[in-house]
Amino acid sequence: MTATIIWTIVAITVLGVLLAVVLYLVATKFKVEEDPRIDEVEKVMPGANCGGCGFAGCRAFAQSCVEAANLDNNYCPVGGNEVMKKVAAVLGLEVHEKAPMVAVVRCNGTCANRPTVNEYDGIKSCKVKAALYSGDTGCFYGCLGCGDCVAACQFGAISMDPETGLPVVDEEKCTACGACVKACPKKIIELRNKGPKNRRVFVSCVNMEKGAAARKACSAACIGCGKCAKECPFGAITVEHNVAYIDFNKCKLCRKCVAVCPTGAIHDVNFPAPAPKPEKAVPKPAAETAKAAADTAPEPTPAPAASPATDKKEE
Amino acid sequence: MKKTFSIGGVHPDDKKISAGCAIETLPTPKTVYISMAQHLGGPAKAIVAAGDKVKTGQVIGEPTGFISAYVHSSVTGTVKSVGLRKDLAGIPVVHVEIEAEPDEWAEGIDTSDTLVKEIPQDPKFIVDRIKSNGVVGLGGATFPTNVKLCPPPDKKADILILNGAECEPYLTSDYRIMIEKPQQIIIGAALMKRVLGVSHVVVGIEENKPEAIARMKEAIASLAAGSSDYEGIEVVTLKKKYPQGGEKQLIDAITHRQVKSMGLPIDVGAVVQNVATSLAVYDAVQKNRPLIDNTVTVTGECFPKQSNLLVRVGTPLSYIIDYLGGVPETAAKAISGGPMMGKAIANLDAATLKGTSSVLFLTEEQTRRKPETNCIRCGKCAEACPMGLEPFLLNKLARNGMMDELEQNAVQDCIECGCCLYSCPANIPLLDTIRIAKGEVIRIIRSRTAPKK
Amino acid sequence: MNKLLVSPSPHIHSKTSTRSLMLDVVIALLPSVLVTVLFYGWSAVAILASSVVFCVLLEYLITRYLLKKPSTIGDMSAVVTGIILALNLPPTAPWWVAMIGAIVAIGVTKMTFGGLGQNVFNPAITGRVFLLISFPAIMTTWGGAKGFIGGADAVSGATPLGIVKEGLMQGQTLQQIFDLHDFSYAQMLFVNIGGSAGEISAIAIIIGFIYLLARKVIRPYITLSILVTVAVFSGIFWLIDPSQYTDPLFNLLTGGVLLGSVFMATDYVTSPMSDKGGIIFGVGIGIITMLIRYFGSYPEGMSFAILIMNSTVPLINKFCKQKKFGRA
């Protein structure tokens, strides 16, 4: 009995030692020489492996940073300037700061704004739907509502609003990795400047049809009338293919365009709301409130915790 | 012996409920909308402008590029506009809007009913007529027929197959023309035979159309008695099995040759043309009559009036439907084409195209998809796949975006026949995901081979 | 008609559904169930009912309360598992044996892997094997049940396979054993008292097999390859030494070979997809079964053979693909 126990212990110990030696030999034999700085850079990365930087993952990005002469072509959208500063510190390089970006959904074709004419009955995928037909409404350009962007987001920053049928971006969580931009077959989502105090003005429509047709399909469509372009003092707005576009690098957030837009297609977010928000933001009152706000625009008083309330104005 | 393809296939109920309805000519609508994207390849370029007067059969669109086709006015009248209009999927496409007046045919078109049996000697003359009269494949893909009849010089066809299988349920337009215009179809076949320089033509017809088989055989016999141009044309009876009319399947059934992956029928020496295309070839060559009308089956159990109509290209679908009594209350889905491969119609105001072969109405109960449940690994999809693929596996790979594995498992061979989804007991939308993955894999393959050239 | 439905093709669907397939299997099992009930009486009814009820109830509870998903019992697969499990138990087994079997079959083997379609092993067989190892006494005691027909003497000690194994171990020759016990093939074919509920009538199982083939629920390759392998394997040994090795017909008709090859080895989830793979799978089961019967310590090896071959299915599926069109 005792002998059995002893022999068992001895056998297992010998086996363990032997295997440890084998493991050690294998580990030394197959050791891959790598620049130790890759590990260091990887340590400061967010570790999301989202691919937003254009590389296969954080390690591939780190490797590219180590091998690159400067960091001009490498930028981690998730970590932003802070992470890039750390990366630069590790490698002793300089980094150009970039303005933080956020994903913006440029469609306001809510269930109320866009009457549906068809019903989709297939796999829940915008890609499949886009390959099949124009979508359930008269608008060929707008959101299809199957949530490919939601599925593509690794940060849980996009969700579908069941009431509007449109995706909503949580700007706190959004890292501007661009996965949703790639996933959207209708190219509705755009990465835009996050803006000072998260304030942004953008055209929430990409419909390239002529005014009447666009309006018929969706009451909140950009009809390409060009009023905003004329109004803009900074030349930030261009109208091409019957749809306006605001260049966020030129936009100074004066919001004059918001006031003149006849369909309410231009959205302003995170601006302080002077009046309690209207229940259903019908284009006209929205434009009026915006106008009122625009008059006092130059030095607006920051309204803390106003963002959730004003956010909802997008409805 | 009845021939059939070697792998897979399913047996949906054929439901040819409009088979007994003779072809009826639909009155010309007040306005037609002629799409410039009627064919595979580059859309035609409109050469008319608002205000122009056009005659029936006059060219209004010119081809852009090698794979493209002429488009002709299907009516006489005034061009109202040239611009974007939504097609049946709701996608904006350039259409020419023409307000119709009584027909006045463009010059050089023979509108008489006399049968022209003599086959022109010069193949180039035949091809030119086919091209200038805008003939495209009417079996579904609408590939320009003249291109298909002129294979690259290093490839030689030795057999022409006329596709009269019409394996999709409900469709009867090919069946009706085989019964009503068999001689014209055979003459069309003889014309294409001359162009290709082949000695053998086979007309493949499924066994569920005995009358068509008999009529076509009679036509061949009577024509062959008068001229040696009609030698070597025969009718072969095919088993009733879907997708018997798939190009690769039909070649396999008739010649036992299998077109290689990513290959074309010409690689195995075969050219396949639909019987309706053959009829269009007859009109184009023997009558110099452009492809401006085609036979459309309007059917469905819920539709009150089954019919086969001769419709001018560009007729709004809503006009056809109103003519027959309007959309039935119980119809839930309208389909252009058959229930297996046809496209769902999102916009009933869309106009017909050259390749529109049917408008089918299905009820909610017939067509609504049932909720997806777990795959039970029964293998019915793999059993049904006529290409020998494993749809259950491709679906999983596609959902995970595994492109290399998709290519290894031959997703690019998929012919989108729908057998897998049709037979899946768990209602998994197999083809939905596979179709998208196939497109992506083919794009990857093309981009890989392109720079090497 | 208000809004037109739009979906990718195809626009029609065959009438076959998971539920209809499972219902067909239940129908195919009915002859066996009927024979069992007739010859084992109320105890067979009790074991069938408790097994089915526990299987279905367990699946319902797990999906609804543990996984918090819509219940999947509507697909009838739990009913099939329940019936097959019951047919694998001695009819005299107490109800709690069926309950434990159901827990192992549905709870452990099926639902932990994600429910129908995800499991590696056949649930009913795993349940049965678990019971066989855990409660060998209960699982190998037959008899004592009073049937609706066939009189009160439906009492028997062991299965023919068990008797043979026992006899051979005691050094008897087959001739002596057969003389002693008077096995008749006719009896085995129709009603063979002694054995698990579902093993008793070969003809009832064959009727079920023909029904499944006619309804195109299964393809015959797996079943036939098992039967042929068992026959050939035992045939070779029987020819070598008929005093030690039982003959092919005896091996086909006794034990779970028929029940297993028709209803359990052909389970979609745990068998290969292709016909070629099915044949390899079937041959494997046949060989393992006969190895256990002839050389193992258990009298019967069908369940173990199916379980072992279940584990090879992913590999078989990987290497046995059907021929693709236009590819050499």
Image (cartoon, helix red, strand yellow):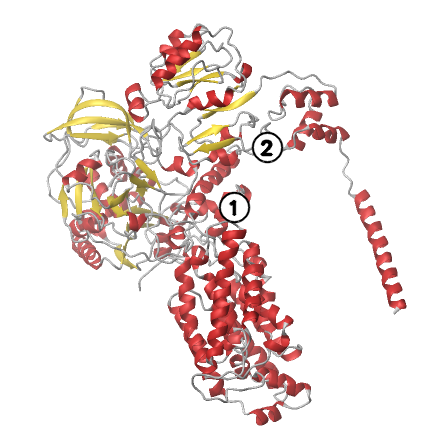
* Residue B243 placement, left or right of A197: left
Q: In this view, does A126 lie above or below B386?
A: above
Residue carrying label 1: B397
Residue B220 sits in which quadrant?
Answer: bottom left
Picture coordinates of residue A276, whole percent (x, y) = 43, 18
Front one among A124 and B137: A124
Badges 1 and 2: C-beta atoms under 8 Å apart?
Answer: no
What amino acid is labelled 2 in the image? Cys
Front one among A298 and B180: A298
Is residue B169 visible in this depiction of the protein? yes
Please give the chain letter of the residue carrying mark 1: B
Same chain for mark 1 and mark 2? The answer is no
Q: In which quadrant will I find the N terminus of chain C?
A: top left
Is residue C316 visible in this depiction of the protein? no
Q: Which mark is residue A255?
A: none
Q: Is mark 1 on a helix, strand or loop?
A: helix
Residue A231 sits in which quadrant?
Answer: top left
Q: Residue A50 carries which label?
A: 2
Q: What element carries label 2?
A: loop
The residue at the point 45 percent across, 69 percent down is C220
Q: Mark 2 packing: few (<14 Cα in 10 Å), some, or many (20+)?
A: many
